Amino acid sequence: MSAPISAIREPLITGSKTYHTITEDICGPTERTPTTAWVIAFIFAVTGLSLYLFSVTWTIWVGIGSWNLNRTINWGWDITNFVWWVGIGHAGTLISAILLLFRQKWRTGVNRAAEAMTIFAVMCAGQFPLIHMGRLWLGFFIFPYPNTRGPLWVNFNSPLLWDVFAISTYFTVSLLFWYTGLVPDFATVRDRAKGLRRKIYSYISFGWTGSAKHWQRWESLSLVLAGLATPLVLSVHTIVSFDFATSVIPGWHTTIFPPYFVAGAIFSGFAMVQTLMIMTRKVLKLEDYITLEHIDSMNKVILATGSIVGVAYLTELFIAWYSGYIYEQFAFYNRVMGPYFWSYIGMMGCNVISPQIFWSKKMRRSILVTFFMSIFINIGMWFERFVIIASTLARDYLPSSWSYYSPSWVEVCLFIGTLGLFSTLYLVFMRVAPVVAVAEIKGILKTGGDQYVGPNIKHDNAHKESTHH
Amino acid sequence: MKQESTQVLYGLYNDEEILLHAVKKAKEDHLEIMDVYSPFPVHGLDNILGLTESRIHIAGFIYGLIGCLSAFLFMTWVFTRDWPIIFGGKPYFSALAFIPITFEVTVLFASVGMVVTFYTICGMGPGVDNPTLDDRITDDKFCIAFDVDNADESKQAALRQFLTDTGAEEVNVKSI
């Protein structure tokens, strides 16, 4: 019935859990009063959120002139932040969809939180193109709706419009996938609750009963959604890279961009998952479900994608030299040696050199090293987007229009503000929903629990026969 | 949704393997199971219960096809009939440039359609309150339920006996 189990495979759930203790451990935090650590984090997050609201209001009230963009550099922190957030949003779907298709069981411990992170990151990402339009209230112009101007349609040949479709589809599909996974777990919370709480969870659990037919359809639905989300997640960052790659600007107009962006997205997404997981498992005491084995696996993904990104950086430099095209050569010379050389160093140092530490198993399994590395990588990936955008635009074809850009306080506050928005959403999610997929964890208990596999295996369990009472 | 209530006799089991044996036994004894409930999807249960394979993926394919065709044909109509504009010297019908949006709309239609179909055929949705037999079914109990609305005393007793014999921890009757 179940797959053959290797005796040396590391267990994915430690602490000899039973089905009931799994429910207790994961649903418990939503039922208790929040811990001090959570309250402190929430105060910081809400402060960030109010900074966000303030700077958005300021931008809309004063206009885009409150940013330091100029005629030459017309994309700055806004699009850098957009690409950064979208990239972070890729790990959730990778974990929940691609790893589901590859039957990687370790995904069950982290998929719920990673998907939540995806949704919140895409929400943050979506802010920037919208605010950047200047007249936010005309934002609906991006959709092809029948209008009184002809109707005049949008340009379906434009990568910026493809982006609108890609991001909105990605957001919708991720949300549906995530929520469908949450419904059985909300039912678990519902059945433990009383009074008003029960009413609320009853409403959001959609009347789930756990019937065999429903589970069968649910599994079928999850599998097909995973199959759809897999090419979708690859398409999204590919299309984001088209925003650059289909332009005629040296340094952007390269065919390497789609795979390079996708690898970078997975890289930064996993780094953000690590940052969040290390804090979540500590605060909610979920060390038995999000084990060192999980952190190790994710660090391997980080090492692989980080190296792909590194190869892409070097390939770009080589191709620029090999092309013999002076504008391309100048663009890359300028990236490394130009006015933004410091961000190139930041990018190379954080993204390519520092992750190499993960060749060592000891480092991969160190919580402290992983935590700091995950922060480094997020900084490095932010620099990568800044390098691509600002250093390229600052030196265009006409030396007379060369310029330098540094952000205004509004742009900085907007970025910090989206961090606040993201943290607020994530902290609320931690309070109201099971952060680990309860039903899925129960499903892998017999193949991943430490009383069934690994060094502490109990033989009466391993050769368990169905006992009739 | 509310119909008149049914009398349900159900047994709660502690482990999915005991449940699987019980369901197998029930099938051998030709007992008519109303439903089986579990806290997580139990592998192999649908085969033993004789459930037909879910056709939700076929629905998904059809929705995807609708999305694919409508996106592609709509863009073609806009750029060749309704408002032809030349972009960058390319032909009006530049099919390659339509691929990204066609793909995204295909995925969007298939996913949204399938999810809506799933909740509809399962009789679920926001605020729907389907009756449940026991609160522990979403926690750690596995449940076999029999419809005993029209069953006489002796039949009920036989079903009770079956449930306890196959290892049920608790046997109860509830009207839902």
Image: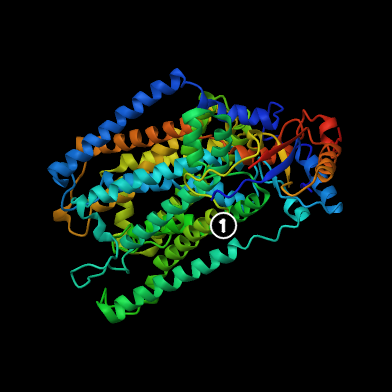
Other-residue count near label 1 (Cα within 10 Å), few / some / many at <14 / 14–19 / ≥20:
few
**Secondary structure of the residue carrying numbered label 1:** helix
Determine the image quadrant of residue A124: top left
Residue situated in front as seen by the camera: A182 or A142 = A182
Residue A292 place in picture, x, y as percent: 62, 31
Expressed as whole percent of the image width and height from the top left, the position of residue A401 reads 15, 54
Decide if residue A31 is on the left or right side of residue A159: right
Write down the residue under mark 1: B121
Look at 30% across and 76% down and name the residue there. Answer: B78
In the picture, measured across the screen, residue A360 lies left or right of residue B157, that is left
Q: How is the image coloured?
A: rainbow
Residue A109 picture location, percent across and down: 60, 37
Q: Is residue B167 visible?
A: yes
Name the image quarter holding residue A327. Answer: bottom left
B74 over B101 or under it: above or below: below
The location of residue A102, given as percent across then percent down, is: 63, 52
Q: Is residue B79 left or right of residue A221?
A: left
Give the chain of mark 1: B
Q: Is residue A403 left or right of residue A351?
A: left
Residue A331 in the image: above or below residue A458: below
The answer to which of A180 and A131 lies nearer the viewer is A180
- Residue at the location (59% across, 66% down)? B58
Amino acid type shown at disc 1 = Ile
